[in-house]
Amino acid sequence: MRILLSSIYPYAFMLLYLIIPFDDYVRALPNLLLAGLVLTFPFVVDKKDFKKIKGVSFFLYLIFVCYLLGNSFFSDRLESDFVVINKFFLPLILVILYIPIRDFKKISKAIVFSSLAAIVFSVINIVFLITSKNIDFQQTSVIIEGLLIDRLYLGILGILSVLVSFNSLQKKYHPYNRYHLLNILINTLFLICIMSKIGLLVLLMLVIVHQFYSEKTAFRKIITILLAFTVAVSVFAIYSGLSNTKSDISETNTENTWFQNTLTFGVRTTVWRCAVNIITEKPSNYFGIGFAETKENLIDCYKIIKDPIRRDQFLDRRYNAHNQYIDLILGAGFIGFFLFAFFLLFTFIKNTNRYFPTAVCIMLIMYCLFENIFHRQMGAYYAGFILIILLLAPNITTPVLNSKE
């Protein structure tokens, strides 16, 4: 029985990540697979497997999530905040469930195939909407409606797929190299077509960072300048958006073209302004006001938007903070924020000798600037995949493209 379960277990884990983008269509299946993995885990794990999770990074993240739980419990808001806290625990559970698996290739293939499936589904759906409803391609609604999942999470999945394929490339000729290169090309072109500005920014950053792992040291000074310039432009764009966005936005044009909509940070800058106002009103908030209370405070801020169309949009969709760090400051206080930031910083420094874990760490750090990754179950699953790479990197048997190793 143990041998049978051990052979099935990796494929169940693989299937879990294969179907995540189709959560809206098979909503119960991911939970059933996760429950099955939990029940099967004691029968397939060995004592020696637990040695994989004895690293400092694992315990830093464990301390962070335990703080969230304890802080919420002693602040008497565990019941209202548990839905969010549960999603911070999910990546940790996935890391533990992964330790009996010896072959990372199965899980990485699930990311690649699920990304391609999501692209095919989205393209077919968009074409169907355009032809059946005779809609102009430039209209935002047809693109958003046709995508399998939110554009931001398609970006996360696409970049993970690109990184997995890039990490699987062999330095010498190998017949599989052509498929990995094709996958990289398809995912990159799709991100360009859907104008995933955050995804493209992250991808550009990862391309620049990879130059530091090249043997051609002459390029490093140039790359450093380009990297600093990219970061400076990004920070300036966000700051400009915050300083120029007013809470009484008067724009009522809801029919902007697709290109115009992809160039604006309107929603995020408005949400960030509200979040910053809440933080400044509670300067001594070391333990936070809770994640549920944070959302209610943001909704109260949206109510003062003067433009009725925009106000209704914000109130109907109940936008969260759209920034994981700001959300932690509000929900768990500065202590929660520093614990999470310290975990990311330590893990990043620890993995800088290998490009693959460094890249996924940078990806997580950057996406947390624009989204509450841990507020969505899908985001928590992908964060779990990232943590598997970061926390178990020495135990993941994949090709290394770092020329220093």
Image: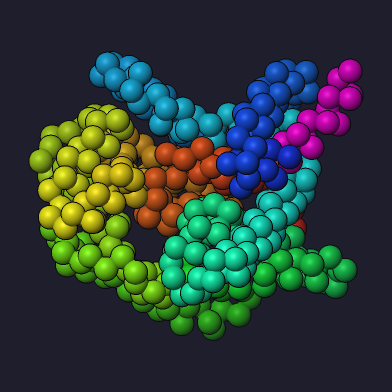
User: Which of the 4 image quarters holds residue 42?
Assistant: top right
Indicate the position of residue 52 as horizontal and vertical percent values: 66, 33
Image point (54%, 66%), residue name = 133
Q: Which residues are magenta?
A: 1-14
What secondary structure do most residues of the magenta stretch adopt? helix
Identify the colour scheme used.
rainbow
User: Which of the 4 image quarters holds residue 328?
Assistant: top left
Q: Is residue 199 visible?
A: no
Q: Quadrant of the C terminus?
A: bottom right
User: Which of the 4 image quarters holds residue 106?
Assistant: top right
Vertically, is 80 above or below 255?
above
Indicate the position of residue 222 as horizontal and vertical percent values: 46, 82
Magenta-drawn stretch contains 41: no
Residue 384 in the figure: left or right of residue 196: right
Vertically, is 377 above or below 273?
above
Residue 46 in the figure: left or right of residue 30: right
Residue 220 vs residue 11, the one in the foreground: 11
Indicate the position of residue 25 as horizontal and vertical percent values: 63, 41
Image point (50%, 57%), residue name = 145
Residue 253 in the figure: left or right of residue 340: left
Residue 139 vs residue 211, the one in the foreground: 139
Indicate the position of residue 111 as horizontal and vertical percent values: 68, 51
Q: Is residue 32 visible?
A: yes
Magenta-drawn stretch contains 9: yes
Vertically, is 233 above or below 26?
below
Q: Quadrant of the N terminus?
A: top right
Image point (54%, 35%), residue name = 91
Image point (27%, 37%), residue name = 295
